[in-house]
Amino acid sequence: MLEIRNLSKRFGGLVATNNVSITVDAGSISALIGPNGAGKTTIFAQISGFHRPDSGDIRFEGQSLLGLLPERICLLGIARTFQIVQPFAGLNVRENIAVGAHLHRASRRAALEHADAIAHRVGLGAQLDKPAAALTVAGRKRLELAKALATDPKLLLLDEVMAGLNPAEIDEIIPIIRGIRQSGVTILLIEHVMRAVMNLSDHAWVLNNGTLIASGTPSQIASNPKVIEAYLGHGAAARMQEQAGGARHA
Amino acid sequence: MRNLATIIIFCLVMAPVPLLIQSDFWITWLTLALFYAYLGQAWNLLGGYGGQFSFGHALFFGTGAYCTAILQIHFHINAWGGFVLATVAGGLIGAGTGWLVFRYGLRGSYFALVTLAFAEVFRILANSFDFTGAGVGLLVPLQPGIAQMQFESKAGFFWLLLMLVAVGLLFTWWLENARFGARLMAVRENEDAARALGVDPFDTKLRAIAISGAMAGSAGAVYVQLFLYIDPNIAYGPAMSVEALLVPIIGGLGTIFGPVLGAFALHVIAEIGRLAFGEAPGLNLVLYGILLVLMVLFLPNGLFGLGRVNFSTARLRRLFKRGSHA
């Protein structure tokens, strides 16, 4: 469904994306993980048209997205959320979601009805008339999800929708995301909450310093020495193995 | 629906006023308040709903005014035809300005400065050409009668402007219940978030500035018929731009009734200022400046937000504290 081929992007001397290739299958939930500053969000920004790649290609259902504006890409069926939530602060929750709903609905009534339905789906049903600025962190994350979902996307890019949530809130949002997939939406997510990644995704890629260092099912990734080193520093994998070995001998 | 009912009630209450009040002074006063309400509605569409604060709405107003004046004087075109063409001219200048400014992504104070500069450029141009009457201005020949949009009674202009204000009210009411309005407000609140939801900000803002310009252009055409005179300072000077933005800011930005409320409030205040300080030139602008600062500090939602305000001296004290540190 989404094919990224040899994508590269640099900001001055910093290589943010280095020759990355990813293929997202229709109907799947895939995760893009990696330490802070690995370049995950930059990849999302390139897919959704906010940044232009220096080289490489991004194809969605066979069509190249290079050079398309964000609003055009959204119209093709790719919706993104923002890691730093971007609510329309002066509007209420219903009006916020309706902006997304209007993409394929010209009538205000249809858009508002769709907004209501989406809000109930992501658990914002009780807060429809609240100003977006009055929502809690968890509420704002859900609103990000709801706005993107209201555009009826084929592919949903979720950028850390669980960051800043407590474990109970994470447990609430996991089945919501699974439900979205079941309704036929393909999902690519960036996430630091490993429990969610393990729980949700069929496939994961690990990014470090702009380069893909591993790819596989979440359990394969979790035991990959390269991944452990990316997160915990050079030699960490060896030390962990040693410790595990030592514990077994004792 | 409640808003629609209020619009209808407002029109029904206002319509018979000239029949009840015989004083020409008060009818003229109300007519001018309606004129500024209409101009404020034009500004409110772009500034209040679209978040694009123009400091140069005189550009559209003046273009409409000159358009109808020149068409009548040099081409003997009927004033109603002039009114229609002035509306079109205002819209075209609006679209042209918007195309230039929004294409380069100018926002906030940059947008304000560019509109201010454009109005000034047109003021200087109008000062330099013969067909605009240069510095002397243009006098539209007196031809009383509805046919030339010069009404014999003061009530005629009152009703014409009431009609235009009603159109403005109905348009904003429609806007609040339409996809275009939702997109415009989304662009105002957060342009990147709007783009991520498939809203084209360039297209949305371009439409808003074109409609806003058309409304201001038609206001210019009515102004010319009312005073039968236009010169570069009236047409393109900053005074008209300031009135256009002050009216909705005082009344309530991005609200249906804000400009109407603001226009009446502003003209009551201006009248009080005239009584208190006399006719010293420029004094009303000083008063407007103080008013604007107070509004932004205490009533950022305008008079319309008065119900929600929590007035406390704390903010004033903080302001002075901040001042003393500087």
Image (cartoon, coloured by chain):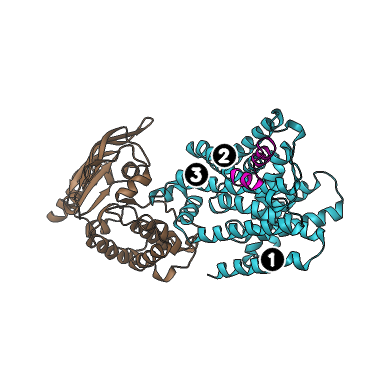
Residue B74 versus residue B286 in the image, above or below: above
Q: Dots 1 and 2: beta carbons under 8 Å?
A: no
Which one is in front in this view, the residue at disc 2 or the one at disc 3? 2
Report if residue B75 lies within the magenta region: yes
Label 1: how many Cα within 10 Å (few below 14, some 14–19, many 20+): some
- Disc 2: which residue: B93
Report helix, strand or loop for mark 2. Answer: helix
What hue does chain B carry in this figure? cyan
SS state under label 3: helix
| Type of amino acid under label 2 | Ile
Q: Amino acid at mark 1?
A: Met
Mark closest to the chain's N terminus, 1 or 2: 1
Magenta highlight on residue A250: no
In the rendering, at what x and y percent does residue B160 appear?
Answer: 67, 56
Range shown magenta: B66-85
Q: Are labels 1 and 2 assigned to the same chain?
A: yes
The residue at the point 59 percent across, 58 percent down is B167
Q: Is residue A212 above or below residue B249?
A: above
On residue B14, the disc is 1
The one nearer the camera, A141 or B189, is: B189
Identify the residue position indicated by label 3 in the image.
B206
* Protein chain holding label 3: B
Residue A244 shown left or right of residue A77 in the figure: left
